[in-house]
Amino acid sequence: TSWLNMCMTFVCGDCKCTDNDDHEHCNALPAAQMIHVMQYVEVFMNFERLLATLNGGKENPLPGQLVVWLNGLLDKTYKPLVRSRGGDILVHINPPGLKIYADVLHFKNVISNLLDNAIKYCQRKPYILIDCMETRDGVQISIKDNGIGIPKENLSHIFDKFYRIPTGNLHDVKGFGLGLNYVKLICKQHGGS
C-alpha cells in the first residue's frame, strides 16, 4: 500500500487555495475525501488478500468439533457484545460432539460476518439462535435473529459483490457490500449453499 499512500500524499497536498477561500477548510475537504477513498481501497485490498488464501479455489479443511470453534468465537467477542445490549445468543448443536471439516479461518469469518450483521441490523435487544445439525449431506448451520430483516425485492441481490440495500443517501450502518458475497463464496467452496 505504499504506492497508495504516496498517491494520497500527492493528491491531498496538491490542493491550492485562492485568496477568497476559507484557508482553514481548503485542505481539509480533499484530505477527508481521500482518506475515505483510501479506507475503501484498503478494505477491498484486504478482501482480495483474504480470498487469495483459498489456495486457488480449494479450501484448507481441518477436522474440528463445531462446539469448540463456535464457543471460542462466541465467548470472547459476541456473547459479551450481545449481552451488553440486553440480548443473548443461543447455540444448539445436534449431535453435541458434531465434527466438521472446514478451513478454520474462513469458517470463523463466515460466522463472524453473519453475527456482525445480526447485531448491526437489530434495533432492539438482539436475540440470535445458531442451530447446527448433522444432515446426510454434511452439516447445516443456520443463524436466526430478530433484526430488521431484508425487503423481499432485495433478497436476490444480497450476495452480489458491493451490493448494499438502497436507503437513499442515508447509511446508518457502515459497510462495503462485501460480507455476504464472501459468505456465499466460502460456503460454495465448502460444498454448501
Image: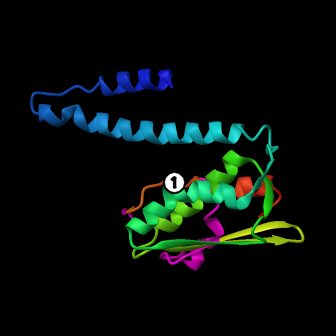
Q: Is residue 150 above or below residue 14?
A: below
The residue that disc 1 covers is 76
Q: Report if residue 182 is visible in the image.
A: no
The percent coordinates of residue 51 (x first, y second) are 68, 42
Q: Amino acid at mark 1?
A: Lys
Q: Is residue 69 left or right of residue 26?
A: right
Q: Is residue 11 above or below residue 107?
A: above
Q: Nearer the viewer, residue 160 or 138?
A: 138
The percent coordinates of residue 27 (x first, y second) are 23, 31
Boundaries of the magenta span:
143-170
Describe the element under mark 1 as helix, strand or loop. Answer: helix
Q: Nearer the viewer, residue 88 or 122?
A: 88
Q: Is residue 33 magenta?
A: no
Q: Which quadrant, please, contains the C terminus?
A: bottom right
Q: Nearer the viewer, residue 69 or 135?
A: 69
In terms of image quadrants, where is residue 96?
Answer: bottom right
Classified by dominant secondary structure, the portion drawn in magenta counts as loop
Q: Nearer the viewer, residue 173 or 112?
A: 112
- Local crowd at mark 1 within 10 Å, few (<14), some, or many (≥20)? few
The percent coordinates of residue 48 (x first, y second) are 63, 39
Q: Which residue is painted at 51% across and 54% down in the image?
A: 76
